[in-house]
Every structure is written in structure tokens, then in C-alpha cells.
Amino acid sequence: MYDIVHGYCCEYDKNNSPPLFEYISWKIRGNTAYS
């Protein structure tokens, strides 16, 4: 799971996509809350 999120972070850095970053942040928060 971490590798997938990290991959998305890399794509965010390359594409500079705020919506994607917000989605990642929300996903990370959700995973952290339920972990």
C-alpha cells in the first residue's frame, strides 16, 4: 500500500496535480485513522 501511495506522490511531483495530492492526503488520513 505504501509503495502505491509513494508512486502516486511521484506522479504528483511530475504532473503537479493538486486534486491528486488532495486525494492522496485524504486516502492517507483514512488509512491512518483505520490502521
Image (cartoon, rainbow, N blue to C red):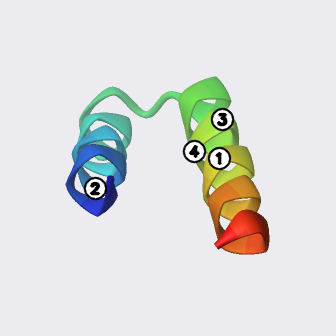
Residue at the image point whose x is 66% and y is 26% from the top: 19
Which mark is drawn over residue 16? Answer: none
Please give left or right for residue 15 compared with residue 16 in the image: left
Residue at the image point whose x is 55% and y is 29% from the top: 20
| Residue at the disc numbered 3 | 23
Quick check: marks 4 and 3 in contact, CB under 8 Å? yes
The mark nearer the N terminus, 4 or 2, is: 2
Q: Looking at the picture, which amino acid does disc 3 mark?
A: Tyr
Q: Nearer the viewer, mark 3 or mark 1?
A: 1
Q: Using a 10 Å C-alpha cutoff, classify the residue at mark 1 as few (fewer than 14 neighbours), some (14 to 19) or many (20 or more).
A: few
How far across and down, in percent of the image, does residue 34 sit? 74, 65
| Residue at the disc numbered 4 | 24
Quick check: marks 4 and 1 in contact, CB under 8 Å? yes
| Residue at the disc numbered 1 | 27
- Secondary element under disc 4, as helix, strand or loop, is helix
Q: Using a 10 Å C-alpha cutoff, classify the residue at mark 3 as few (fewer than 14 neighbours), some (14 to 19) or many (20 or more).
A: few
What whole-number distance in Å separates the C-alpha atoms at marks 4 and 2? 9 Å
Please give left or right for residue 19 compared with residue 17 in the image: right
Identify the image quadrant of residue 14. Answer: top left
Residue at the image point whose x is 51% and y is 28% from the top: 17
- Secondary element under disc 3, as helix, strand or loop, is helix
Name the foreground residue: 24 vs 31.
Answer: 31
How far across and down, in percent of the image, does residue 12 sit? 38, 38
Residue at the image point whose x is 69% and y is 41% from the top: 22
Picture layout, residue 26 above or below residue 17: below
Identify the image quadrant of residue 6. Answer: bottom left
Quick check: marks 4 and 2 in contact, CB under 8 Å? no
